[in-house]
Image (cartoon, rainbow, N blue to C red):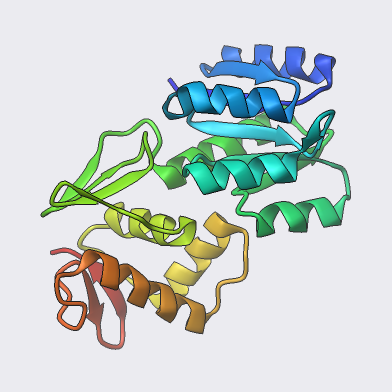
């Protein structure tokens, strides 16, 4: 059962949305402000699977809270924004938010967005392993040979994409499309090359002769056998 942190100062939204999410099988912990949310995250960050953040908060804003979350852990974030507020959307995505939905929103659409983001992160699933590599989606950690690796948010998402498609050849276009959906930011062909290189440097014993992320000339990349 996925555990959602809901941060919104509108009591009616919190009550109605919490009830709806619980009916859909989620655990929900709600709070009204940035400081309370940070306290909850410090106490049990590993217990949350996703954060739903309102942009406007009484003691700060959702942007600062998103930045704090993303700098501390790989918790997925979906913003609740005012309808048509393009600035909020762009600012939130630039800070690493995984998705946004405009108020007023259709509850079923929100559920669909939540499930989509959770699938990207492999939340609620068992650890993903290949050779000496182990990824624990519930904690957002990556280790090789028992030693934890430090990955950026986009590197982590790219690794999850490879692990969830083990042995499958992924074209550059497929990777670009997936990363666009995951990151909410512009990822071009040159940027993808850079991230593949960085990820190999962290995963491979010999990045020039990779065992994890293999180049399939003319087709794309394949993770593992």
Q: Which residue occupies 59% across, 12% down?
A: 23
Image-based side of 57 in relation to 108, left or right: right
**Residue 80 drawn at (x, y percent):** 75, 37
**Residue 213 drawn at (x, y percent):** 24, 70
Q: Nearer the viewer, residue 4 or 222?
A: 4
Q: Which residue occupies 12% across, 53% down?
A: 132
Image-based side of 128 in relation to 48, left or right: left
- The answer to whether 18 is drawn above or below residue 6 in the figure is above
Residue farthest to the bottom, as pictured = 218
- The answer to whether 192 is drawn above or below residue 107 in the figure is below
**Residue 76 drawn at (x, y percent):** 53, 41
Q: Which of 54 and 169 is in front in this view?
A: 54
Q: Which residue occupies 40% across, 55% down?
A: 156
Q: Is residue 84 visible?
A: yes
Image-based side of 185 in relation to 13, left or right: left
Query: To which quarter of the image does residue 6 belong?
Result: top right
Report the quarter where the C terminus lies.
bottom left
Image-based side of 72 in relation to 145, left or right: right
Q: Which residue occupies 58% across, 17% down?
A: 28
């Amino acid at each position: 059962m996925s555990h959602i942190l809901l941060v919104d100062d509108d009591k009616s939204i919190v009550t109605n949305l919490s009830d709806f999410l619980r009916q859909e099988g989620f655990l929900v912990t709600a709070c009204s402000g940035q400081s309370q949310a940070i306290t909850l995250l410090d106490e049990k960050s590993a217990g949350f699977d996703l954060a739903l953040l309102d942009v406007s908060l009484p003691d700060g804003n959702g942007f600062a809270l998103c930045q704090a979350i993303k700098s501390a852990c790989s918790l997925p974030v979906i913003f609740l924004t005012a309808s048509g507020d393009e600035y909020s959307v762009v600012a939130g995505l630039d800070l690493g938010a995984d998705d946004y939905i405009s108020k007023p929103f259709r509850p079923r659409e929100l559920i669909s967005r939540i499930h989509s983001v959770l699938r990207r992160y492999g939340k609620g699933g068992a650890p993903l392993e290949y050779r000496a590599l182990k990824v624990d989606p519930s904690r957002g950690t990556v280790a090789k040979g028992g030693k934890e690796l430090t990955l950026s948010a986009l590197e982590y998402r790219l690794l999850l994409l490879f692990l969830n498609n083990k042995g499958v050849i992924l074209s550059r276009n497929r990777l670009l499309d997936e990363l666009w959906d995951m990151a909410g930011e512009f990822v071009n062909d040159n940027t993808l090359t850079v991230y593949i290189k960085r990820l190999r440097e962290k995963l491979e014993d010999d990045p020039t002769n990779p065992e994890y992320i293999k180049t399939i000339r003319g087709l794309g990349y394949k993770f593992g056998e």
